Amino acid sequence: MSASVGIAETGPEQPKEFAFTAANLKKAKAIIAKYPDGRQQSAVMPLLDLAQRQSGNWLPRVAMDYVADMLAMPRIKAYEVATFYSMYNLKPVGKHFVQVCTTTPCWLVGSAGIIDACKKQLGIGLGETTPDGEFTLIEVECLGACVNAPMAQINDDYYEDLTPENTVALLQALADGKPVKTGSQTGRRGSQAKSGPTSLHAQAKAAGVEG
């Protein structure tokens, strides 16, 4: 996810209060119950993630305070976690949070072109959000789908084997509220070689991934 930024003390986007909904409070209690007595503070990461999802994919300071208080831990400890891990967004992001990998494997096969396509289609630069709040665009380090590079993560989903053309089509479909295909955009199965299976042909054929 996005690179963490400093916790904003003030700002029009910072809410003054936060509390889990009844449904999320039930989830939070179930998460905490997974940890042994005296180790409940270990639940800080999943609870911060739950708070972020409730807040619209970003983590306000009051939400961090709420989680810390729930776990009876110093608030600074929650801040340390939230600012260390890039999965937490410390400022608002768009409905569609577009994270394009630009690490070496993706770069070698054209991630720069994917970035350019996103900029042109969305009309924004890296680290910016469209005026309608629909899209935020950033570049990130390796997302672990190197075989299917270039790739991007949008919210919780991976989109792989990208080209400038299918990236534009993907973004337009999201903007139009249409269903989109996750994973490989070219029909590749898993992390299979583009040419198809190179070994275990009988097993591949039985699994329906080799003609």
Image: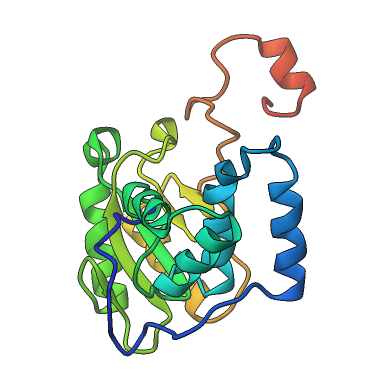
Q: Position of residue 154 (x, y in %)?
A: 46, 60
* Residue 183 can be seen, yes or no: no
Residue at 70% across, 38% down: 37
**Colour mapping used in the image:** rainbow
Is 38 left, or right, of 126 in this rendering? right
Q: In the figure, 30 relative to 61: above or below?
A: above
Q: Nearer the viewer, residue 153 or 122?
A: 153
Residue 59 drawn at (x, y percent): 44, 68
> Which quadrant would residue 204 be assigned to in this image?
top right
Q: Is residue 26 above or below residue 78?
A: below
Residue toward you, 139 or 23 = 23
Is residue 122 at all visible to an observer of this figure?
yes
* Residue at the image position 26 percent from the left and 48 percent from the top: 111
How many labels, in total?
Answer: 0
Residue 203 in the figure: left or right of residue 196: right
Of 62 and 55, which appears nearest the observer? 62
| Residue drawn at x 58%, y 33% as measured from the top left | 190
The answer to whether residue 120 is left or right of residue 60 is left
Q: Position of residue 126 (x, y in %)?
A: 22, 66
Indicate the quadrant containing the C terminus: top left, top right, bottom left or bottom right: top right
List x then y, in percent, for residue 95: 48, 75
User: Looking at this view, is 7 or 173 the one in front?
Assistant: 7
